[in-house]
C-alpha cells in the first residue's frame, strides 16, 4: 500500500523543477477552481524553498502569503506575478475558442 506521505514527498520533489511546477499549476488552473489553484501555489512554494524564502523574495509577509494560499485571499495580479516569477514562471494568455 502506498502512503499519502510518499505521494506528498514525491510531489514536492517533482515541483522543484520549474517545468513540472508550470504543468502542475496550469492543469489546476484549467480546472477553474481558484481556491485549489491557490493551495497548489503553496505546494510549489514549499517545494522551492519554503514560505519564508518566498516571503523575503517577493516582499510580502508570511501571514499574507498564507492567506493567499488558503484560497480565502484575493491577491492582486502584481502579487501573483511576483510569486510566479520567484518560481521561475510567468503568466501568459492563450486564445480560447468562444463557445
Image (tube, helix red, strand yellow):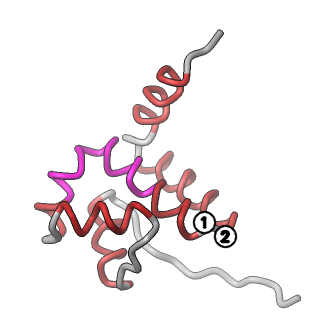
Q: Does residue 5 lie above or below 43 as drawn?
A: above
Q: Residue at x 40, y 31 (%)?
A: 13
Q: Are marks 2 and 1 in contact (CB under 8 Å)?
A: yes
Residue 65 percent coordinates (x, y): 27, 64
Q: Does residue 28 lie above or below 12 as drawn?
A: below
Q: Which residue is mark 2?
A: 32
The picture quadrant where one finds residue 27 is: bottom right
Secondary structure under the numbered disc 1 in the rendered image = helix
Question: Would you say the magenta stretch is mainly helix, strand or loop?
Answer: helix
Residue 14 percent coordinates (x, y): 46, 35
Q: Which residue is mark 1?
A: 29
Q: Residue at x 24, y 69 (%)?
A: 64
Q: Residue at x 55, y 60 (%)?
A: 36
Q: What residue occupies the far right of the structure in this picture?
A: 99
Q: Residues within 10 Å of mark 2 (few under 14, many from 20)?
A: few
Horizontal placement of 75 versus 7: left or right? left
Q: What residue occupies the far front of the structure in this picture?
A: 72
In 3D space, how far apart are the residues under numbered discs 2 and 1 (Cα atoms)?
5 Å
Front residue (pair 67, 85): 67
**Magenta-drawn segment:** 40-54
Q: Residue at x 28, y 73 (%)?
A: 82
Q: What residue occupies the far top of the structure in this picture?
A: 1
Front residue (pair 42, 95): 42
Front residue (pair 34, 27): 34
The picture quadrant where one finds residue 72 is: bottom left
Amino acid at each position: 500500500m502506498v502512503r499519502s506521505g510518499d505521494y506528498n514527498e514525491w510531489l514536492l520533489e517533482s515541483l522543484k523543477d520549474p517545468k513540472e511546477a508550470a504543468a502542475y499549476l496550469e492543469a489546476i488552473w484549467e480546472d477553474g477552481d481558484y481556491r485549489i489553484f491557490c493551495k497548489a501555489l503553496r505546494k510549489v512554494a514549499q517545494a522551492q524553498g519554503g514560505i519564508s524564502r518566498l516571503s523575503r523574495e517577493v516582499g510580502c509577509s508570511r501571514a499574507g502569503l498564507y492567506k493567499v494560499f488558503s484560497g480565502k485571499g484575493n491577491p492582486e495580479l502584481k502579487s501573483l506575478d511576483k510569486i510566479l516569477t520567484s518560481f521561475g514562471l510567468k503568466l501568459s494568455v492563450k486564445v480560447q475558442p468562444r463557445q
